Image: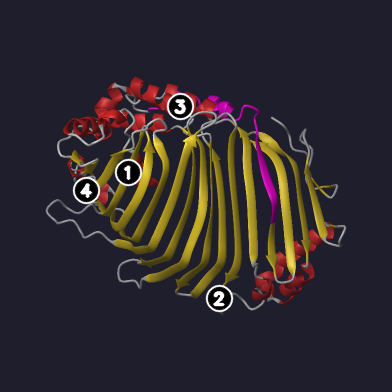
Amino acid sequence: MFARQGLVALLAICPVSAAWAVPATEEGAARLRGVFQTYFGGTEGVVAVTPQGESYELRIDPAPLLAQVPAEQAQVSVSALTYRLTDNGDGSWGVSEDQVLSWSVVVPRLFEQKGTTRVESTGIWDEGLMSFREQTAVMTDYVIESVQYAPPPPPGAEAAPEQPPAEPEVVSRDHQRTARMEVSLTGVPGKAGGVDQAMSFTAEGLEQSQEILMGPGGQPMTFQITAPGYEGSGQITGARTEGMLSLLAWFVAHPSEELIKGSQDGLRDKLAAAMPLWDDLSMDAVLHDLKIGSPLGEFGLASTKVTVGLSGATADGRLHERVALSGVTVPEGVLPPWVEPILPQEVTLDFTASGFDLAAPAKMLIEGFDLAAEEPFARLVPEQLQAALLPGGTADLKLAPSQIKGDGYQIDYRADIAAGPGAAPTGAALISATGLDKVEAALAAAPPEEAAQPLMMLRMARAMAKPGASGENVWDIQMPEGGGPFTVNGQPMGPATSQP
């Protein structure tokens, strides 16, 4: 979906004045054609703009461009795309479509894929923002068929020249279908520059079937994956749409390796102008009632929640990931009987990394590459890149309160640690647990050859625990500065760590 929106965003009408586009004229069509050729190049037959009443029909046919890709490397086809553009007279354009999109990709003897979907969308493109003020898109019957082949043999193992090459070996076949997807997008000027975008999305009727072949003559393994749907939202602050579209236009104007190498200082300028790409990006999604059919039976997850956050190439770098799983089900007979009563039903993990700099190393990479050299990044010094990435020598790693929860027991954990290469981690972690009697009883009832080691480790851990305010087991882990041993509830757990 992001790739589709990127394609629509290439309808960048930014240099076009609204004054001459109402009503649509041949002159206006010619000017629009020139704008789009900035992004798609001047190859004959790619871009066509036709006035139709008070709007323009834009047709983009990628075939002439894709025909330039050497067939021995890849064969790519994409159906021609048609859009309707209407000048709103205020520096914005209405953009709409109702069409079937299809594509195919063949990498000889490695990979094949075909896809198709129906797309209906409407939106308002803002020339000043170089982004949509608003857009809604609906994709129905989204289908992808893929085939993966085993890598070809190394050059020394190829057949004799007089023998025809053997047929490639199929490794897997994959079918994916989504009945319906819908995306809504809004965009406003960013407070610190760029564009702030907010997005919501939903999908219904997910299904996937995969067949994995276990060598010539072997029985294939089949998997069936279904879910009624998912929904979520996303935000981008400070997206540098103008810089990214300008970078795309530069690559269109330099379509060969020779042209890129010969103009790499211009590429450097375009990359620098597009930084930091965005200030902050975040997304959250919930997948419902996932079912995975396998040769062992059907596995399931009632709910899968995912949150991701990522800064752009900024000095205050940040990465955030949160995963929450609930309602785990396993086919009968897959797990030993003693495991089933203590199988976790809910698991959460909430992790954040910060205290690192992405702007400084990005600047070094942009200024330091040489595409004409045998090793394009040979001039860069790894130690300098590391120092730029971690100016304080460490990054801050935080595990927000998370837990593992099963029938009758619960384990909670959190941590706040500073760590980096060549430095001993410092900080603290706290683990607490209730209901461990049930877990220990299940391990004790299991065959010794299956559970003796985890039972021993659990008993050792409980022996080191201290009682909490509500009777829970608590492990307070401290990692002091200065190279001292880490402690659990005040008890040293190892020799002092030498500092470099």
Dot in front, 1 or 3 = 1
* Secondary element at image label 4: loop
For the residue carrying disc 4, how many other residues have a C-alpha within 10 Å: few (<14), some (14-19), or many (20+)?
some
3D distance between C-alphas at marks 1 and 4 = 16 Å
Task: Tell me the number on the disc at residue 95.
Answer: 1
Q: Is there a contact, CB below 8 Å, between mark 4 and mark 3? A: no
From the top left corner, tell me how far across and down residue 12 is, in percent: 33, 35
Quarter holding the C terminus is top right
3D distance between C-alphas at marks 1 and 2 = 53 Å
User: Which residues make up the magenta segment?
Assistant: 376-402
The amino acid on which the numbered mark 3 sits, given as a three-letter code, is: Leu
Residue at far left of view: 162
Residue at left offset 72%, top offset 74%: 442
Q: Kindly identify which residue carries mark 4.
A: 80
Q: Kindly identify which residue carries mark 2.
A: 334
Task: Tell me the number on the disc at residue 365.
Answer: 3
For the residue carrying disc 1, how many other residues have a C-alpha within 10 Å: few (<14), some (14-19), or many (20+)?
many
From the top left corner, tell me how far across and down residue 357 is, in percent: 58, 30
3D distance between C-alphas at marks 4 and 3 = 37 Å
Residue at left offset 38%, top offset 62%: 178
Asked if residue 26 lies in the magenta stretch, the reply is: no
Q: Earlier in the sequence, mark 4 or mark 3?
A: 4
Could you say which quadrant of the image residue 112 lies in?
A: bottom left
The amino acid on which the numbered mark 1 sits, given as a three-letter code, is: Val
Q: Earlier in the sequence, mark 1 or mark 3?
A: 1
Dot in front, 3 or 2 = 3
